[in-house]
Amino acid sequence: MAYDLEEQEQLAELKAFWNKFGNLISWVLIIGLASYAGWNFWNYHQRTQAAEASAIYDELQKSAAANDNARAQKLAADIEAKYTSTAYAQMAALVAAKGAFDASDMKTAKAQLQWVVDHGSDEYKAIARLRMAGVLLDEKAYDEGLKLLGAEFLPQFAAAVADRKGDILVAQNKLAEARTAYIAALAAMDKKNPGRKLVEIKLESIGGTVPADAKAAA
């Protein structure tokens, strides 16, 4: 009998506890399960998106290799529209920009590069800005190119930015400033970078002197 009374007391306590906190516990469980389900769905969605984007990107690369610029642009636009959150969208835009550039379609090339600047990660944005500056150099839009290179870049792009600035300044016949830019490029460039020699040649061609430490490294 004592056992029955004790059991009844426990049941009564449990019932009182559930009456007081049952709704809260239920909502916590529902939210937790929903979050877990949502996380799994998001991961599945991301994997699916990446797989689909990868397949289209492969087709884009084949079109670019075949110099089929029209198809390359169509495929790139498809990836950019449907798979914006994947790295493939940024890579597709860069490939499409090069295809357009090779086809002398500067308007499309710049539009693709701008897409990366607007939607890409910091690293892809840096690559897009550098390539855009190259297009602007070809178009003789020197001030616009220098302004673009004045944006904030990741540290690892310092040498490439200074080198591109030097190219634009040479085109403007601002040789003293160009020499400073090329020297800055050498200072920021890894000693084993094969591109150092080209920068040295450009520096010397405009009357500059390669720093002694750069020569020693070479």
Image: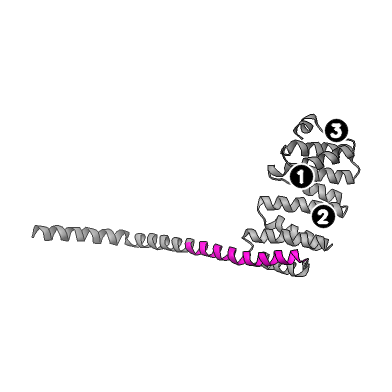
Residue 105 in magenta? no
**Which residue appears farthest toward the left when viewing the image?**
1
Q: Which portion, as a residue range, is magenta?
A: 40-66
Q: What type is the residue that disc 2 sits on?
A: Val
Q: Is residue 47 magenta?
A: yes
Residue 135 marker: 2
Disc number for residue 209 = 3
The image shows residue 51 at horizontal and vertical percentages of 58, 65
Type of amino acid under label 1:
Val
Q: Say which element carries label 1.
A: helix
Residue 165 vs 79, above or below: the answer is above
C-alpha distance separating marks 2 and 3: 28 Å
Relative to 81, is 13 above or below?
Answer: above
Using the numbered discs, state the Cα–Cα distance from disc 3 to disc 1 in whole angstroms.
20 Å
Q: Nearer the viewer, residue 24 or 170?
A: 170
Q: Earlier in the sequence, mark 3 or mark 1?
A: 1
Residue shown at 20%/61% (left/top)?
11
Residue at position x 73%, y 60% from top?
Answer: 95
Residue ID for mark 1: 161
Q: Position of residue 149 (x, y in %)?
A: 77, 47
Residue 183 occupies which quadrant of the picture?
top right
Crowd class of label 3 (few under 14; some 14 to 19; many from 20; radius 10 Å): some
